[in-house]
Amino acid sequence: MSVQIKNAAELALMAESGRRLVEVLTSLKNQIIPGTSLIALDQLARSETERLGGQPSFLGYRGYPAAICTSVNEGIVHCIPTGYKLQNGDLVSIDFGFIYRGWHTDSAITWIVGEDINNYLPLLKGVYRALEAGVARVKANVKVGEISRAIESSLCQDQLTIMKQFVGHGVGRELHEDPVIPNFVGHDREVVLPAGSTIAIEPIAGVGKEGYTTLADHWSVKTIDQCPVAHFEATVAVTPEGVQILTPIKQILGFTP
């Protein structure tokens, strides 16, 4: 295992990548309204990424056909945008990666469409709290297991079901780098994160059971019991002082954590 360390100039490029990523997500947030199709969101992500001088990390990755993942309600991850039109009360998770001058950042956010008629807000707040708990543990020479334990403890405290098959990861020159960052104490728990390393922390949890199914498109993953799932992700850099959040999504959450 090799945890890649970025120098100051490289971290600055990643910070700029993350800033532009959040700008794209902001444009998408403004269209998270009843009647917007998932394909329209993907087209907007592509055009905004091009306007900002970047490339979408996901498009073409292992054959993935879109710029964003759009997981609605019982969707967990990797759901390909379709012609489905958002409805009032839907839950939609947008996962998106941005490449700027060769550097990837990766982030995800879950929004409620229109009114919270299904009382999804406690789920969103719980998963976002878990993201913050994981980020708060980041510092030079922290072990991955400490971050995972903080995420797991937070999700368990809120009695949410951890989707354990889906994990965070290193990110930088590649979309996925070492190490794995699970949302429970598991893989790579003893791996130490030195200053200059960069990771994507991404708790994914729901209110039902952990069982999932992958659709015929070989990408879209949904819960078997059709219970909703939320997904939040941030790319962060490990610094000598602690942590630098490279994809500051807090400003566009749509709710107060």
Image (tube, rainbow, N blue to C red):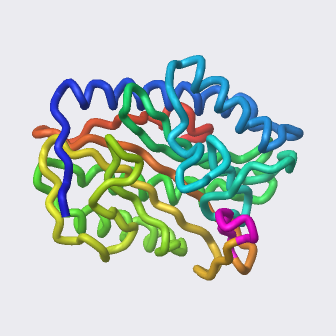
On screen, residue 41 versus residue 181, left or right, reads right
Residue situated in front as seen by the camera: 229 or 2: 2
Considering depth in this image, is 49 or 132 the residue closer to the camera? 49
* Magenta stretch: helix, strand or loop mostly: loop
Write the residue at 73% across / 56% down: 72
Q: Position of residue 205 (x, y in %)?
A: 54, 67
Magenta region includes residue 218: yes
Quadrant of the rendering where the N terminus is positioned:
bottom left
Give the side of residue 90 with respect to residue 184, left or right: right
Mark count? 0
Q: Is residue 70 visible?
A: yes
Could you tell me residue 68's position as x and y percent? 63, 44
Judging depth in this view, the residue of 242 and 51 nearest the camera is 51
- In this rendering, is residue 183 above or below 60? below
Q: Is residue 110 magenta?
A: no
> Which residues, given as a range, are shown in magenta?
215-223
Residue 199, image x and y in percent? 31, 49
